[in-house]
Amino acid sequence: MPLKSDAQGRSCNFIGGEWVPPSTAEYAPNRSPANLDEVLGHFPASGRKDAEAAVQAAKAAFPAWAATPAPARGRILWKAVELFKSRLDELARTLCREEGKTLAEARGEVMKGINLLEFYAGEGFRIHGKTLPSEVRQTFTCTVRQPLGVVALITPWNFPFAIPAWKSAPALVTGNTVVLKPASNTPATATLLAQVYEEAGIPKGVFNLVTGPGGAVGNTLVDHPEVKAVSFTGSNSIGMALNERCAKRGIKVTAEMGGKNAAVVLDDADLDLAVAGILQGAYGSTGQRCTATSRVVAQRGIAPRLVEALVAGAQKLQVGNGLEPGIEMGPAVDESQLKTDLRYIELAKEEGAKLLTGGQRLTGGAFDNGYYVQPTLFVGVRPGMRIHQEEVFGPVIAVVEVGDFDEALMVANAVEFGLSSSIYTRDSNLAMRFVERVEVGMVHVNNPTVGGEAQLPFGGWKSTGIGEREMAEEGAEFFTQLKTVFFDYTGAARTSKIY
């Protein structure tokens, strides 16, 4: 499925059911972080007028789409599921090339997005309210959920297919019309998403795609008076500012932001299981996941063996272009993220953490033409260090040693974030105490900190998230507003009032 393009081979925005060039007449090359000589295409560097046009197209399409029965909306998503399944390999290769994940990770992400679309296709039959008894005779009372209108989706680069899918599918099936602004460095995968929605039969204007910088496109969407809700995933600084602006307009907002996720390993843990889970959680997707394992809180009895095994595992990882067989970790997504990774590594050393492995940019041969960094592990980390407190978003593990369970729990909670965590132990009592007391939105027992399923809510506590959960039924509820209905089926006027 080739990308939609103009006569010069440049990609387009998708607005009002048409593939149109940007009003700015400006384009940006989309380069692979694994090989900077590889250009996937040139994508619109759109501006305010493009975002406004997309909002107006969505506004015009809203009445008819909202009036479409929800099961019929769901069937369009189901058609998209079938199309995505038939093009899984193509989507995965595009995602791998533009984001840098390994091909296996890219395939996994596409399948997760498909699973989410499957779930929300069925949600067209499950958008429900409640029937409740009234205090008044011969009166039927219930609640119904109705769409908001035009919604803006602002998505990050680290999951360029799954996150647009898990935001757009519930928005669409509940009857809203959508404007999607994907991250500027991963526009190709989002463009393929739009093309499949078009082929699946989405009516004109119901789904719109505008690529370009957040300063122009994102700000226009957030401040536009016709936009009734904003769903954002990205950094804390942008998410908090966005929340303030949406609050001033009185519109709904959900912002899924940072994480500093801890894997707690107690002395009685299955060592092999813990090592495998931590390596997957920390170095999978080059650590570029909000649920990545960036901290390991290890009880002192097991810490030496655990660290030794983690160092050995990190050193065995094959780093390179994710399209090549045998590669287990790809590059950082761009130069800015690579610099962030290296800066935090230097900060950790300056603060007194001990570097046991990694810590360098990979050079030589093909590495010179990409943004590669070694899998990295620090020990001697203290809770007050920045490497323990701040999100790196790279393949860096910070190990803290503790004496007992209570200290482990305290250290796990000693950050501003609260997205995900895990504990490795054979003691079910301690596992349940951890589940009850850890300050996160998602907790795993003897499993990595990463992962999620379509039918389960996704999101965190504290500085991690604002607004309602994503995915599952809760993800659809965010895109609706609740209406309470009082129906006096006798037709007679009430002679008394309760209040």
Image (tube, rainbow, N blue to C red):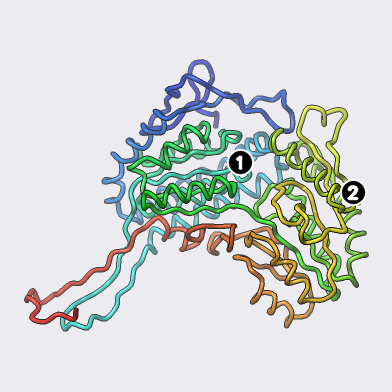
Label 2 with label 1: CB-CB less than 8 Å: no
Q: How many marks?
A: 2
Which residue is located at x 92 percent, y 65 percent? 305
Q: Name the residue type under label 2.
A: Thr
Q: Residue at x 77, y 41 (%)?
A: 343
Query: 96 or 357: nearer the eye?
Result: 357
User: Percent position (x, y) of residue 406?
Assistant: 76, 76
For residue 434, above or below residue 33: below
Vertical comparison of 74 with 346: above or below = below
Residue 75 can be seen in this image: no
Looking at this view, is 385 or 268 the one in front?
385
Q: Given the current orientation, which residue lies at the most extreme top position?
A: 8
The CA span between labels 2 and 1 is 27 Å
Picture coordinates of residue 414 (x, y %)? 70, 65
Residue designated by label 2: 357
Quarter assignment of residue 260:
bottom right
Which mark is nearer the camera, 2 or 1?
Answer: 2
Q: Is disc 2 surrounded by few (<14), some (14 to 19) or many (20+) residues within 10 Å?
A: some
> Residue 203's x, y, as percent?
35, 40
Estimate how packed mark 1 is, as few (under 14), some (14 to 19) or many (20 or more) residues with alpha carbons within 10 Å: many
Give the position of the C terminus as an image quadrant.
Answer: bottom left
Q: Position of residue 78 (x, y in %)?
A: 45, 51
Label 2, secondary structure: give it: strand
Taking depth in this image into account, of 491 and 467 the one nearest to the observer is: 467
Residue occupying image coordinates x 64% and y 59%: 417
Task: Describe the element under mark 1 as helix, strand or loop.
Answer: loop
**Residue at 86% from the left image edge and 48% from the top image edge:** 349
Where's the N terminus, which quadrant?
A: top right
Q: Which mark is residue 157?
A: 1
* Residue 284 appears in the figure: yes
Identify which amino acid the numbered label 1 is placed on.
Trp
First along the sequence among labels 2 and 1: 1
